[in-house]
């Protein structure tokens, strides 16, 4: 049964496509997984990818990807999808296409072509600009030409980027995302993303080993948002997440816990003071 807690990527029997009833989208979301090898260039401490390894997505079979997307969307639309009966009627409408999967999608060299294929399939089935297409990314590679090309196409089809910023300090980034330094600072990468496509910052908050996020971390994060405002980077808002399921990383086993709801509400209030829209997904 599809549910908001069962996100198995293999359920639909396709290689690149999987259906999810998602609390994020509030209904049926079509997931796209390019990282079929469970590889990511980051290793976020709360990551829920099974057997996560460091690396990039393997070469994508674009023809297969197109066929799967076309077939799957057509099947859902016509009600000819083997699990459709199990989905509550009010949740059967496709809410969005989410490019996320088992690793960082922009590590796929074919990323730009993937967006063009999504555009073509949506046009074919008469849903271009009717269904939102969301890229969920750590934003580490947005300065690469093939990623910019994809972001530009995504922007043109009314898409969105959800850009991960979990910490604004080098120590926090190293602890949470387990990555040290990227080619450009988060703020410069955010600027690139926001100028190509509508972009939200997405931030995951949690307690680690019984400790809440520190005041230093919170202050640095709020200061980063103030800088985003000062530099007029056109961010749409902040999506603040609590963890819903346990981390699948062995080094984080049982250490990551959900924060009290009031903590998220108070932090969201602090963020709002910077002038940004905030949505909590606890
Ligand atoms: S960027 Fe996403 S897939 Fe990669 S490690 Fe972080 S949470 Fe996991």
Image: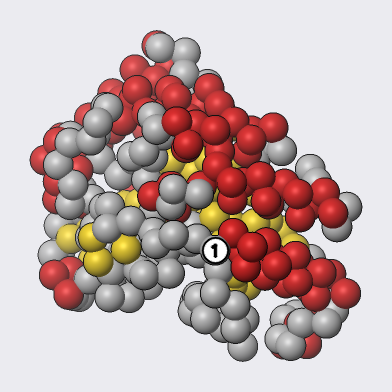
Residue 10 placement (x, y as % from top left) = 52, 81
Q: Disc 1, ligand 1: is the CB inside 8 Å?
A: no
Residue 217 placement (x, y as % from top left) = 19, 38
Task: Name the quarter where the N terminus is drawn.
Answer: bottom right
Q: How many marks?
A: 1
Task: Name the quarter where the C terminus is drawn.
Answer: bottom left
Left or right of 31 on screen, residue 103: left
Residue 124 appears anywhere in the view: yes
Left or right of 31 on screen, residue 86: right
Q: Secondary structure at mark 1?
A: loop
Q: Residue at x 55, y 26 (%)?
A: 196
The colour style of the image is: secondary structure
Q: Residue at x 43, y 41 (%)?
A: 163
Q: Residue at x 50, y 49 (%)?
A: 110
The crowd level at tag 1 (other Cα within 10 Å; few <14, some 14-19, many 20+) is few
Left or right of 268 on screen, residue 150: right
Residue 221 placement (x, y as % from top left) = 28, 32
Specify the quadrant of the image occupied by residue 152. Answer: top right
Residue 203 appears anywhere in the view: no
Residue 62 placement (x, y as % from top left) = 59, 59
Q: Nearer the viewer, residue 275 or 30?
A: 30
Q: Residue at x 59, y 77 (%)?
A: 14
Q: Is residue 156 above or below residue 12?
A: above
Specify the quadrant of the image occupied by residue 250. Answer: bottom left
Q: Is residue 131 above or below residue 91?
A: above
**Residue placed under numbered mark 1 in the picture:** 61
């Amino acid at each position: 049964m599809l549910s908001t807690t069962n996100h198995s990527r293999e359920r639909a029997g396709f290689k690149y496509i999987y259906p999810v009833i998602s609390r994020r989208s509030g209904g049926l979301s079509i997931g796209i997984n390019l990282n079929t090898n469970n590889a990511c260039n980051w290793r976020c401490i709360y990551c829920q990818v099974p057997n996560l390894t460091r690396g990039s997505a393997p070469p994508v079979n674009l023809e297969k990807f197109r066929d799967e997307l076309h077939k799957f969307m057509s099947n859902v639309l016509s009600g000819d999808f083997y699990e459709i009966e199990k989905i509550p009627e009010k949740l059967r409408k496709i809410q969005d296409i989410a490019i996320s999967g088992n690793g960082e999608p922009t590590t796929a060299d074919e990323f730009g072509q993937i967006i063009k294929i999504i555009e073509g399939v949506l046009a074919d089935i008469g849903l271009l600009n009717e269904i939102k297409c969301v890229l969920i990314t750590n934003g580490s590679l947005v300065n690469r030409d093939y990623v910019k090309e994809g972001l530009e196409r995504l922007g043109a089809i009314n898409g969105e980027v959800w850009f991960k910023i979990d910490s604004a300090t080098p120590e926090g980034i190293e602890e949470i995302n387990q990555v040290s330094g990227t080619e450009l600072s988060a703020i410069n990468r955010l600027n690139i993303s926001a100028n190509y496509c509508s972009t939200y910052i997405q931030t995951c908050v949690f307690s680690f080993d019984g400790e809440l996020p520190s005041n230093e971390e919170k202050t640095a994060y709020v200061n980063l948002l103030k800088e985003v405002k000062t530099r007029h980077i056109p961010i749409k808002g902040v999506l603040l997440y609590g963890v819903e399921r346990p981390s699948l990383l062995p080094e984080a086993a049982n250490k990551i816990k959900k924060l009290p709801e009031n903590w998220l509400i108070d932090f969201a209030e602090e963020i709002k003071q910077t002038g940004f829209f905030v949505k909590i997904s606890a």
